[in-house]
Image (cartoon, rainbow, N blue to C red):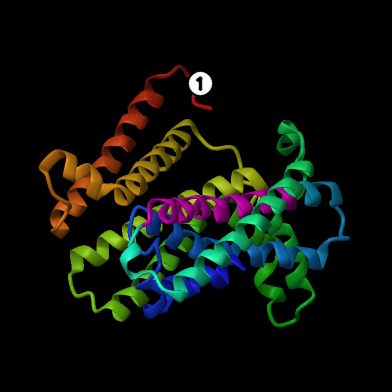
């Protein structure tokens, strides 16, 4: 229901024009969720096909955590959507479609709260992840083994290679998703500025990469081998930089108005403000983590 409502509010031009959350800072979180929700929902549903395979306790804990991540991904934009409604954003153009969107928002919010309560009751102990012996990738291989067409592409060698290169797999998948999303948006909205397109791809790709890393940590999609200290520092730095990049993208106009008296109006300023802040945060995080004694980066 969340995905259906959000696709309607963001992709139908007539509906989007009367949506309270059509602009930033609300739209950043709504647009991210509309991309992130489907893959999470798909992998959760697919895992039910091997629910009774060996490793049931691990599967139960991991799936509950993935459901928690899915609930969180939907819950954050719901908060921002309600904020847009409460402040009366674009109230001058509200009409019947706006009323329908707000009614749908109320229904989805109730369902999200109910789902959150169920997930909370099903939560696993904090240290449960350290004892997991199975991951989602193993279940993918199990499913693939039942399909003659793809069986040879999911052998033990491929599975182990994916585990060793999980970070690269997440990065490639994030870049591919960003290229698809921004490519479609550029065509639909007639973007021609390479700098604007490159900036948008960067924001989506880094956001999706952070999403992959964080949800993998929570739900154990791919069991990654122990990382070196430099790799650990680099990953944490990227996550910090991405958080600041997304925040600056969402709140760029209010912040720039405080500094200059007006909103961001040019692409170079947009890129400098958002990407610059993200790079600064990433560099600062790397410096702080690198300065800590070994073993203190967790």
Residue 142, percent from left and from top: 77, 65
Height in image: 107 above or below 273? below
Question: 239 and 230: which one is in front?
Answer: 239
Relative depth, front residue between 101 and 69? 101
Asked whether residue 30 appears in the rendered view, the answer is yes
Position of the N terminus by quadrant: bottom right
Q: Residue at x 17, y 45 (%)?
A: 257
Q: Main secondary structure of the magenta part?
A: helix
Residue 16: in magenta span: no
Residue visible at 54% across and 37% down in the picture = 227
Horizontal and vertical percent position of residue 58: 79, 47
Q: What percent of the width, then of the height, locates residue 100?
A: 52, 72
- Residue that badge 1 annotates: 296
Q: In this orientation, which residue lies closer to the viewer: 215 or 10?
A: 10
Residue at x-position 32% and y-position 80%: 188
> Which portion, as a residue range, is magenta?
62-88
């Amino acid at each position: 229901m969340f995905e259906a409502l959000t696709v309607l509010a963001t992709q139908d031009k007539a509906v989007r024009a009367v949506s309270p959350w059509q602009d930033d800072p609300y739209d950043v979180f709504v647009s991210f969720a509309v991309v992130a929700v489907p893959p999470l929902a798909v992998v959760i549903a697919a895992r039910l096909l091997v629910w009774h395979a060996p490793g049931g306790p691990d599967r139960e804990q991991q799936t509950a955590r993935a459901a928690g991540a899915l609930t969180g991904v939907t819950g954050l934009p719901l908060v921002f959507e309600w904020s847009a409604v409460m402040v009366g954003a674009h109230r001058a153009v509200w009409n019947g479609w706006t009323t329908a969107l707000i009614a749908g928002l109320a229904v989805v919010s109730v369902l999200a709260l109910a789902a959150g309560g169920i997930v909370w009751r099903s939560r696993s102990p904090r240290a449960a992840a350290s004892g997991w012996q199975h991951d989602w990738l193993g279940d993918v291989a199990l499913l693939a083994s039942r399909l003659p067409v793809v069986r040879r592409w999911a052998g033990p060698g491929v599975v182990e290679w994916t585990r060793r290169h999980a970070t690269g797999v997440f990065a490639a998948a994030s870049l591919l998703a960003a290229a698809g999303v921004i490519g479609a948006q550029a065509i639909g909205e007639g973007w021609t500025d390479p700098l604007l397109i490159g900036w948008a791809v960067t924001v989506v790709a880094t956001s999706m990469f952070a999403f992959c890393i964080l949800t993998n940590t929570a739900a154990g999609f791919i069991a990654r081998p122990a990382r070196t200290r430099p790799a650990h520092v680099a990953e944490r730095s990227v996550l910090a930089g991405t958080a600041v990049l997304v925040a600056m993208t969402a709140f760029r106009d209010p912040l720039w108005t405080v500094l200059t008296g007006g909103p961001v109006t040019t692409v170079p300023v947009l890129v400098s403000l958002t990407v610059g802040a993200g790079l600064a945060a990433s560099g600062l995080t790397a410096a702080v983590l690198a300065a800590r004694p070994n073993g203190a980066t967790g």
